[in-house]
Image (spheres, rainbow, N blue to C red):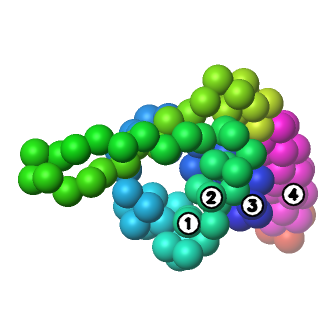
Amino acid sequence: MNDNELHYYVLKKLEDNPHITQRQLAKVLGVSLGKTNYLIRSLLDVGWLKLGNFRRSNNKMGYAYILTPRGLADKAEVTQRFLERKKTEYQRLASEIEALELEVLKNQK
């Protein structure tokens, strides 16, 4: 996955679960903790995310990643671009599958 796709998945996961830890997010994304930290910092730097503090009952500091209004708007654009890339990829794969199926049928005769 490239960084644009990873940004999409980070935004999606954080929107679904703002209290997810970077370690949990890294595991879900299948990337290193360092890469996850880099991605989150880049989203914080461009203003798509903000970091909120909260206190847990065990008195440890915790954080929530909150999408900003700008982040929500830009996420919609990122989602549209991601969808278009996936559609193109799907169409390419469908064509390749069709060609392979024809080749298999041809070889069976």
Q: Looking at this view, is 87 or 55 the one in front? A: 55
Label disc, if present, on residue 41 of the rendered structure: 2
Residue that carries the numbered disc 1 in the rendered image: 37
- Give the SS element for disc 2: helix
Q: Position of residue 63 (x, y in %)?
A: 37, 48
**Res. 41 image quadrant:** bottom right
Q: Gap between marks 3 and 4, in whole Å?
A: 26 Å
Q: Looking at this view, is 69 or 17 the one in front? A: 69
- Give the SS element for disc 1: helix
Q: Which residues are magenta?
A: 80-104
Q: Gap between marks 1 and 4, in whole Å?
A: 37 Å
Q: Position of residue 8 (x, y in %)?
A: 67, 45
Q: Hey, what amino acid is under mark 3?
A: Asp
The dominant secondary structure in magenta is helix
Q: Looking at this view, is 43 or 3 the one in front? A: 43
Residue that carries the numbered disc 3 in the rendered image: 3
Q: Gap between marks 1 and 2, in whole Å?
A: 6 Å
| Mark sitting earlier along the chain (3/4) | 3
Q: Hey, what amino acid is under mark 4?
A: Glu
- Is residue 108 something that shows in the picture? yes
Q: Looking at this view, is 70 or 23 the one in front? A: 70
Q: Position of residue 14 (x, y in %)?
A: 49, 42
Residue that carries the numbered disc 4 in the rendered image: 96
Q: Is 53 placed left or right of 31 in the picture?
A: left
| Mark sitting earlier along the chain (1/4) | 1
